[in-house]
Amino acid sequence: LRRMLDKGLVATVNSDDPAYFGGYVQANYRVSAQALRLERDEVAALVRNGITASLMPKSEKAALLAEVDRVLAACGS
């Protein structure tokens, strides 16, 4: 994931059918960050990429990206 981010690729962390496979997205972010020793800015890039790459309307993407920025600012990032 880090190499993908370093190369400018739109890498994302996701989940698919978490009720069946147990892979909830927040857990997938946590495990990825721990296993790969990702920095906060790298995890934030993955979150932003996931929002940007989604199929939701642009207005919803903009609102979620603004919320990510708000939360990161509140956490000192």
Image (spheres, helix red, strand yellow):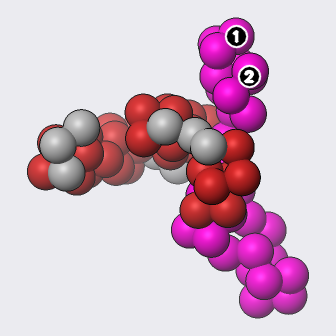
Which residue is painted at 42% across and 41% down in the image? Answer: 40
For the C terminus, give its image quadrant. top left
**Direction from residue 56 to residue 10 in the image, left or right:** right
Instruction: Tell me the kind of residue under disc 1.
Output: Lys
Report the residue marked by disc 1: 7
Rendered image quadrant of residue 46: top right
Q: Residue furthest right?
A: 21
Report the residue marked by disc 2: 4
Magenta residue check for 21: yes
Which residue is painted at 64% across and 22% down in the image? Answer: 5
Q: Is residue 68 above or below residue 25?
A: above
Q: CA distance from mark 2 to mark 1?
A: 5 Å
Q: Residue 33's spot in the image, x, y percent?
A: 60, 50
Q: Which residues are magenta?
A: 1-29
Instruction: Tell me the kind of residue under disc 2.
Output: Met
SS class, disc 2: helix
Which residue is painted at 62% across and 43% down in the image? Answer: 37
Residue 54 seen in the current view: no
Which residue is painted at 62% across and 71% down in the image? Answer: 27
Rendered image quadrant of residue 73: top left
2 and 1 marks in contact (CB < 8 Å): yes
Q: Is residue 71 above or below residue 11?
A: below
SS class, disc 1: loop
Q: Is residue 61 above or below residue 30?
A: above
